């Protein structure tokens, strides 16, 4: 009896969450031209958002923790493997080898040009190190290289800024930004200096923030070298310094947003907030088999890599896709070009669903014990809509 009641409560809470998602998407499709106003009204609907946050909190802490490995477990394991288990070092070693190959090819081209033109003409090299560009440098005493660069980003921001690139070994706590955090689950782990952001926090450890309209300020390398650099953040955050975090986590966040443009903005903001070689971790639900939405994941990869990332890991678990992207460090050259990309490549299947289909998905529930168990597992990672540097 208790098990049946638990499943019913599980599905009731899931219905609250999915109902909000469906309603937001419905408004977006109907009033797309006025979506900024729709989003503003959504963020101001404190009672509905409070109910959503409460449902998410109870699902995450009362139901999802019963799994052998939760989405939070996977994120933590992946992050620690990357920074402390040799993942970052292997990625940087690969970059170093690539630089040597590019240099050798460049030298060969220059010699060929000299013989052909009988001059000492030298080509401009994109791999030459200078005072304004940091190339591969990994030492125990120089884990963060600082330089100035002028960049023009995909969000239209053009500015002179300080750049901090992460090298190895990485010491101290990892600065982790959990966007759409709800209850700041990563604060439970001593390896992280975790900052949780949400438009409707479930508890006082999470800061209220509309990540889509976050102001990005210049980084302070001196402050960032201190472990208490974010201890005095206000309850409501409207700005954060660029290149300040080792990790940005989007766990069940991107599918919450009804617009591909919004997902693109989130990924661009993550790029700005991460230091070079930082990690963007994305968890998004999908109860289908791996290849059902393979085209979507391929599209996401191309879009996100075009911003300035390279995929480090991808895993499809039973009901979720788990992705990790490394931010390219200053001066890094890719081993292959990324194709053209645009915000609409960050689509989700529900972008093309009609409202009746979504309403049916919210209430669908089977009667047999095995069906109930499958439904329970499906609702463990919501909403239901459907490695890498070393695994291209």
Image (tube, grey):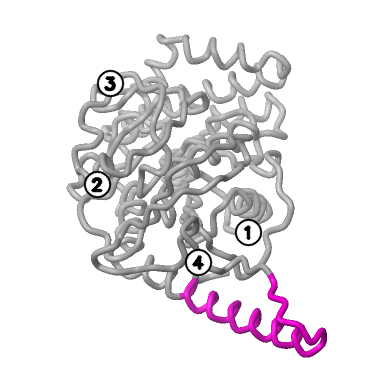
Q: Quadrant of residue 207?
A: top left
Which mark identifies residue 234? 3
Earlier in the chain: of badge 3 and badge 1, it is 3
**Distance (Cα) linking label 3 and label 2:** 20 Å
- Residue at 61% x, 28% y: name it: 258
In the image: residue 186, left or right of residue 248: left
**Residue at x-position 55% and y-position 32%:** 364
* Span colored in magenta: 94-123
Whether residue 350 is situated above or below residue 286 in the rendered picture: above
List the residue tagged with mark 2.
225
* Pointer 3 local density, CA inside 10 Å: few below 14, some 14–19, many at least 20: few
Residue nearest the observer in this picture, 245 or 151:
151
Which-is-in-front pick, marks 3 and 1?
3
Mark 1 lies on residue: 291
Q: CA distance from mark 1 to mark 4?
A: 42 Å
The magenta stretch spans residue 51? no
Please state which of the two labelled residues, at mark 3 or mark 2, is closer to the viewer.
2
Dot 4 falls on a residue whose secondary structure is loop
């Amino acid at each position: 009896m208790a098990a049946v009641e638990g499943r019913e409560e599980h599905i009731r809470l899931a219905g609250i969450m999915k109902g909000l998602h469906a309603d937001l998407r419905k408004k977006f499709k109907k009033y797309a031209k006025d979506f900024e106003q729709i989003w503003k009204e959504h963020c101001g609907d404190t009672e509905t958002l409070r109910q959503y946050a409460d449902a998410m909190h109870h699902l995450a802490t009362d139901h999802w923790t019963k799994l052998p490995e939760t989405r939070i477990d996977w994120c933590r394991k992946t992050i620690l493997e990357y920074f402390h288990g040799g993942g970052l070092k292997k990625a940087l070693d690969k970059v170093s080898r690539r630089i040597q190959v590019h240099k050798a090819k460049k030298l060969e081209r220059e010699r060929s040009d000299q013989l052909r033109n009988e001059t000492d003409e030298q080509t401009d090299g994109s791999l030459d190190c200078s005072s304004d560009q940091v190339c591969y440098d990994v030492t125990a005493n120089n884990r963060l290289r600082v330089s100035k660069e002028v960049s023009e980003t995909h969000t239209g921001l053009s500015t002179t800024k300080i750049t901090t690139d992460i090298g190895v070994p990485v010491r101290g706590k990892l600065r982790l930004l959990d966007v759409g955090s709800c209850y700041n689950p990563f604060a439970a782990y001593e390896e992280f200096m975790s900052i949780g952001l949400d438009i409707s926090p479930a508890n006082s450890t999470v800061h209220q923030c509309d990540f889509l309209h976050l102001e990005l300020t210049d980084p302070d390398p001196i402050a960032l070298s201190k472990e208490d650099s974010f201890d005095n953040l206000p309850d409501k955050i409207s700005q954060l310094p660029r290149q300040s975090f080792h990790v940005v986590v989007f766990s069940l966040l991107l599918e919450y947003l009804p617009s591909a443009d919004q997902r693109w903005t989130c990924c661009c903001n993550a790029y700005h907030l991460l230091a070079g070689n930082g990690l963007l971790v994305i968890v998004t639900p999908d109860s289908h088999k791996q290849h059902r939405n393979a085209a979507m994941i391929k599209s996401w990869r191309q879009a996100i890599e075009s911003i300035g990332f390279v995929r480090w890991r991808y895993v499809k678990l039973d009901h979720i896709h788990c992705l990790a992207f490394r931010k390219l460090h200053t001066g890094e050259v890719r081993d292959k070009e990324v194709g053209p990309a645009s915000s609409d490549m960050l689509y989700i299947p529900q972008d093309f669903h009609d409202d009746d289909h979504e309403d049916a998905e919210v209430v669908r529930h089977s009667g047999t014990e095995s069906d109930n168990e499958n439904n329970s597992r499906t609702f463990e990672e919501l909403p239901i809509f459907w490695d890498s540097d070393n695994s291209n």
